[in-house]
Image (cartoon, rainbow, N blue to C red):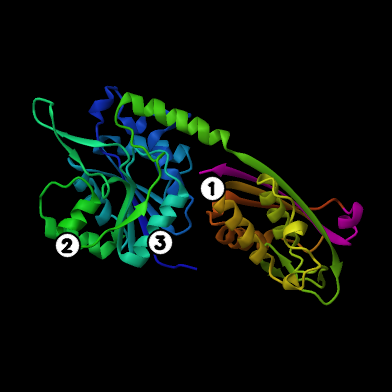
Amino acid sequence: MNTTRAAAIIPAAGSGTRMHAATPKQYLHLSGKPVLVHAIQPFSRCTFIDQIIVVVPAEKIAQTRILLQEHSLAAPLVTVIGGGRRRQDSVRAGLEATRADTEIVLVHDGARPLLSEALIRRCHEEILQSGAAIAAVPVKDTLKRAGSDLRITATVDRDSLWQAQTPQGARRHLLLEAFEANGDVDVTDEASLLERAGIPVQLVPGEENNIKITRPEDLALAQTLMNNRTAGIRIGHGFDAHRFSENRQLVLGGITVTHDRGLAGHSDADVLTHALCDAFLGAMASGDIGQHFPDTDPVYKNISSLVLLDSVVRDASSRGLSLINADVTVVCQAPRLAPHLPSMREKLAEHCRCSVEQINIKATTTEKMGYTGRQEGISCHAVVLLQQN
């Protein structure tokens, strides 16, 4: 598990004059939430992000803090500070507000509301490997150079041209070096800053939907794309039950729970993780856990169910699906599970590649009714919501 501390800086101090709106574009609403909230939320769901610094106009700091609190984006994860006249001034202010032990810094435009967690993860991984990275998409249209009279003077070769997006970022010390080397020269983005300092920047394939809201028509396009994304939401339900068995460890949600008996099964019999796997598979219309990991196959004998969950999550990711949230209910009379639920949430979030806030686990009894009430076994229900990236 990666322990490198990472921070996200969200510059959102611009006035957005090209929107011709009384409200700055980052505060305009998209699908019921401000554009800025959409831009921040994917970072809040990434477990490797330890700090999010939102840089806004000084006169909007208090308003923004209240706004973000309303959307569960508050301290200690999120910090709101005042920005500067230029984008680079705001990013520099955000950089200075990062914790001293921060190693990776990602910068993302507050006016790009359709960012996916998968793209954040790809940029983060590339920075870990290469030191600096930028999301970008290859230029597709033919490019023309024109004179002041708007007459074409040349056709530009697009073969090696890429359109810059965000996130952009680097190891913190490289960004600090780049700012010092640049002085007060105007730059348009972090990649330009790093280039001027002679620091190599690696391209990461971006996403066509990762548009920037600049003009009124961009907001309309973003709403259409958001509607299409919502149409790609899939729900799945999973259920599993296992009998108690002597001389077995009790494993639930990847955590070993002290009890006089464990659960019977071909694998580690983690009934909670099995139900969660089935919920993922249900959302993908991909059968059930027995089809993918049959109890007749010796490969799965005593295997950790977290390995099975990893496989299912990889399958979802390969289909462009990511977890919005999971809700799990464990039904057992004993043992008492409440003290173990936080550890289970953390463990499952790690293997589902999401934040702890996206995993909910409840434990209940049947008031001594039925097979769980008679302590013959444990059952579990799980529901997951996936979205198409």
Is 176 left or right of 281, judged from the image as shown? left
Q: Give the mark, 2 or 1, whose residue is nearer the N terminus.
A: 2
Look at discs 1 and 3 and give the one toward the viewer.
1
Q: Secondary structure at mark 1?
A: loop
Give the x, y percent position of residue 245: 86, 70
Residue type (three-letter) at the residue carrying disc 3: Glu
Q: Earlier in the sequence, mark 3 or mark 2?
A: 3
Mark 3 to mark 2 CA distance (whole Å) = 21 Å
If you read the primary sequence from the N terminus, does the residue marked by circle 1 or circle 3 appear first?
Answer: 3
Q: Residue at x 61, y 58 (%)?
A: 345
Q: Residue at x 26, y 59 (%)?
A: 201
The structure residue drawn at horizontal position 13% and vertical position 26%, both measured from the top left corner, is 150
33 or 82, nearer to the observer: 33
Q: Residue placed at 52% from the left, 54% from the top?
A: 355
Residue 225: percent from left, percent from top: 46, 32
User: What kind of element bears circle 3?
Assistant: helix
The secondary element bearing badge 2 is classed as loop
| Most foreground residue, 325 or 294 | 294
Q: Mark 3 = which residue? A: 125
Q: Amino acid at mark 1?
A: Gly
User: How would you rate the neighbour count of disc 3 (Cα within 10 Å): few for under 14, some for 14-19, many for 20 or more?
Assistant: some
Image coordinates for residue 72, horizontal then vertical, percent? 48, 43
In this figure, which residue is indicated by the disc labeled 2?
Answer: 198
Classed neighbour count for the residue bearing mark 1: other residues with Cα under 10 Å, few (<14), some (14–19), many (≥20): few
